[in-house]
Image (cartoon, grey):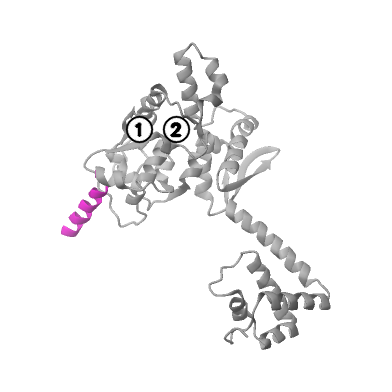
Amino acid sequence: MDKELSKSSAQLDLFSEESLLMARLAPAFREPLELLLTRNQYNVMDRRIYWWVLSKLSHTQSARKDVVFALPPTDLTFHIPVRELYCVGELVDASSITDELKASADDTNGRDAVFRRRSARGHFTIQPTYQHFKHIADGLVMKSIIKIDHMNLLDPASRVGGSISMFTDAFYQNGFLQVTVNRKLVPSMCRLSEGYTEVERQAAFSLASEYSQLLYVQFCRWADLGKWVIDPVELQRVLGAETYNRYSNFKQRVLIPAMQEINLRTGLVVELEEVLTRRKVTSLRFVILSRKAQAKAQIRQAVEQIIDEVQNYSASDKLSSVVEVMTTKYTFSREQERAIVANETLMNEFIRLGSLIDGGLVTIKTSPTRYIASILFPTEKSGKR
């Protein structure tokens, strides 16, 4: 019992105001599936605020099933520098929106509306007004209301139905948004054992469309599998785009622009394949690759092409090529060199391994010579001449 109380006290200390202020803003945020599957009315900036809070809470999250999250003694208050809600390169000088501002030159409310539109789309001017950040704070609490009838952590026994507001208050002052998170939702934000999606924060913050944000998180969720298959109607529901009655309109106005922005601004490369049944699109298959994985696949393809070309050389040309590479780039023993050129199987394997090394497709802890020798001559100790 004492151990449980001690663990609970230590956990509550993590949510102290001092701990939250000192906590590092994580480069990636982890969104529990229980919250990912909820629906709300967030716009681009509202969602970035929510993601900022998840990034700040990353040090308290756990995927261990034996961890029991106690309710914090009070609601959690976060002080968010508004500039941290934007990416490098997103800070826009007001002069870049001169035409929009000229149209509202004599209308204060119109000028504020310009800034609000820019802010909602993820652009931040160096002339922020009190009004447009106040506008964000004004709507955040109401937009954060979510249904709780599917949230096991809130009520695992009776499954009571209802709703709860994630943010209990929100204020703006002097370049900071102060938001307060409902303590009843904190365990749901920290418990990852039921599944979660990890998202690169700066990539997510770079997206300036609500559809792109929602689609990107789903792509991150399925990235490990490399694919995601979903019904078009269900995808419209996930993205909150049910107003489009025709799939063709939804595709052109929502899906394609969102995919283009994700491919341009994030580390994912996504392609769409449509499955047709009687000329009707009945399923959407997304192929999801990380940009690094795509680059590696392209390198591997190029390397395999080089290997095929060299191995198809005439015997004399192949021998000349192998001898030249072997004597200029490696330090095999004389015996090992003679063994390689005398055995076509060893020669072909030497070509393959050397090409993989040149393409950066293998990780070598020693030297290239030792690495190749350990594979070609596993019973020998590879040493320099």
Q: Position of residue 294 (x, y in %)?
A: 62, 54
Tell me which segment is drawn in magenta: 1-16
- Give the mark nearer the N terminus: 1 vs 2: 2
Residue 252 located left or right of residue 105: right
Q: Secondary structure at mark 1?
A: strand
Q: Residue at x 74, y 76 (%)?
A: 324
Q: Main secondary structure of the magenta part?
A: helix
Q: Is residue 106 in view from this perspective?
A: yes
Q: Is residue 163 in view from this perspective?
A: no
| Viewer-closest of 381 and 195 | 381
Query: On the image, numbered disc 1 is attached to which residue?
Result: 176
Farthest residue, direction top: 106
Q: Residue at x 54, y 16 (%)?
A: 102
Give above or below for 374 relative to 262. Answer: below
| Viewer-closest of 57 and 167 | 57
Q: Position of residue 204 (x, y in %)?
A: 49, 42
Q: Position of residue 26 (x, y in %)?
A: 40, 48
- Examine the structure image and report whether residue 5 is included in the region drawn in magenta: yes
| Viewer-closest of 232 and 79 | 79
Q: Residue at x 57, y 75 (%)?
A: 367
Query: On the image, numbered disc 2 is attached to which residue?
Result: 45
Q: For mark 1, does the 10 Å Cα neighbourhood hold few (<14), some (14 to 19), or many (20 or more) residues? A: some
Where the C terminus falls, by quadrant?
Answer: bottom right
Give above or below for 298 relative to 183. Answer: below
* Amino acid type assigned to the residue bearing label 1 in the image: Phe
Where the N terminus falls, by quadrant?
Answer: bottom left
